[in-house]
Image (cartoon, rainbow, N blue to C red):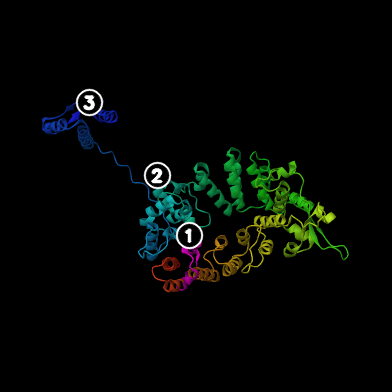
Amino acid sequence: MTALTTAGDSWEELQTTAMLGTDRRPLPALTGSPALSAAAQAVERADAATALLELAALETVRRRAGAVAAEADGLPEPAAPDPRRELPEAAARRLAVLVGGRSSAGMVANLGELLPQWLATAREHGFRAPAALLPALLDAARARSELRPDAVALAGPLGRWLAERNPDWRFVTRTAVEPGRSASAAGGASGGGGGTAPADPGDRIWEEGLFAERVTHLTRLRRSAPAAALDLLRGTWSTERAEDRLLFLDALQEGLSPLDEPFLEAALSDRSKNVRSTAAELLSTLPRSALAARMAERARAAVRLVRPAGETGGTRLVVSPPVECDSAMQRDGIPPKSPTGRGQRAWWFGEIIAAAPLDLWTSDTGLTPEQLLRLPVVDADVDLTGQGGDGSVQAGSWADDLREGWARAAVRQQHVEWARALLGPSPRPGQAGATVGAPAKLLAVLPPAERAAWTAAFIESHGLGEAFQLLGACATPWTPPLSTSVVAALERSARTGAYPWSHSGVLGMTERALAPETAPAVEALASGAAPDTAWADTFNRLAATLRFREAMLTELNV
């Protein structure tokens, strides 16, 4: 059959004319059968731009009509079997709502904030995601990297099989399932119905993954096989960029042990000062490391306990900060120049105290952390003379630096006794909290129940204004006492006329962490609030979210 065509290579001619413009290049000449002469004449009567589009349409039809179907490839091997339990029907419907991001109730908080909790819980219960929902689940994980480990585990072998056929989901093949969490989900991609086991996806991630994926993989591997993770890092260490070495080194915090000391000691000589500093910080968390011993000697030289002689004076801590930062100190991670704007001696002193083992203070003095924190702190020069340069008696100026160094050490070394002493009892109304250190970081060192009780007491006394970071340090879901304190504080804020958005950060956290058992109390607040007000909407939304979370967790707990 003869079709209307253009002279020469028709499609390329049309493309060239479109790019150059019909005013610079004439339309290609038409040829074809008499049966299509009417179409040709219609094209010729049109203006040049319209004619070009008409020709392109005709040529497209001609090319498609003349295409020869390719020979079909053989069907791919099916995905490996997944022996895990199917999701209960109610839970599958809930997942469809969560990945869709919309609630039929219309009053529930951002469902995207609840999806991570649903995924983690479903994974812990050993479920597999329904096949029909895998595309939506993988699309959600593609957009949010924090969802990927749990989403990929739930997707299992079928998810990896799908990812091999859709480049949008290629992240699946670079996401390793944490060992010990879900063995069947870790089974690889397609495998001929359970044939040859695939290569370890972790190896592929380390060799081909994006930097963030490699860091995540290294961190997760440290939780289950610290030595294997260290060997993996050691194998490529010399070829990594300085900024990458820094974050890889930081990942060694997971599962840190004395076995890592030789590698970290070698890193103290790294060409990057940031790498050297991070290696020193990691070594300082190992109380029996050689670096910790060196820092202990420096700390003893910088702070000594002076006991009273006879009836005069009192027990005190006398501080003699270093007067220089020698090469040995620099190799142990202490920069010679303060990056914080503090005085040089104060900076060096703080770095030494933060890196020294905390147990040396109690073992050397025989005092408890609480007793040490109550002692006066004085400068060595003032202690010798009792007077300042102008003849007046001077108080020590190093107390805050010493306390802050101890606080940093307690966080590094996860020392519960020191963290508890530094925090002290939750401050009463009118009292300031800890003036040095980071209370939220110290709080995170304590056992979960103690954290919750301390934070609940703080909120009862001080409200929610300063509690955001403290709440973030508490384990979720919050215990009933802590949840009750938060709800009571929200009620007080509503009564005083404060706007809900002044607590937007805490409110967002409550949607994810507040105990579902507090839903009736929140519903009572909603019913008691003035209708059509911001607080009424806030309490209604929070109550609906709590009910939603309660239902979704109940559906999975079967």
Residue 228 can be seen, yes or no: no
**Placement of 417 over or under 190, stated as above or below:** below
Q: Is residue 508 magenta?
A: yes
Q: Position of residue 382 (x, y in %)?
A: 81, 54
Q: In which quarter of the image is the N terminus?
A: top left
Looking at the rendered structure, which numbered label has been put on residue 120?
A: 1
Q: Quadrant of the C terminus?
A: bottom left
**Residue pictured at 40% horizontal, 46% vertical:** 168
**Placement of 69 over or under 321, stated as above or below:** above
Question: In terms of sequence position, does the residue under pointer 2 or pointer 1 come before the other?
Answer: 1
| Residue located farthest toward the front when viewing the structure as drawn | 390
Check whether the beta carbons of the residues at disc 2 and disc 3 lie within 8 A of each other.
no
Looking at the rendered structure, which numbered label has been put on residue 215?
A: none
Q: Where is residue 300 in the image (x, y as percent from the top left)?
A: 78, 53
Looking at the rendered structure, which numbered label has been put on residue 26?
A: 3
| Residue extent of the magenta highlight | 495-521
**Residue labelled with disc 2:** 167
Q: Is residue 374 left or right of residue 208?
A: right
Check whether the beta carbons of the residues at disc 2 and disc 1 lie within 8 A of each other.
no
- The answer to which quarter of the image holds residue 385 is bottom right
- Element at badge 2? helix
**Placement of 15 over or under 422, stated as above or below:** above
Question: In terms of sequence position, does the residue under pointer 1 or pointer 3 come before the other?
Answer: 3
Q: Between 518 and 121, which is closer to the camera in this rendering?
A: 518
Q: Which amino acid lies under the numbered mark 2 shown in the image of this protein?
A: Pro
Measured Cα–Cα span from mark 2 to mark 1: 25 Å
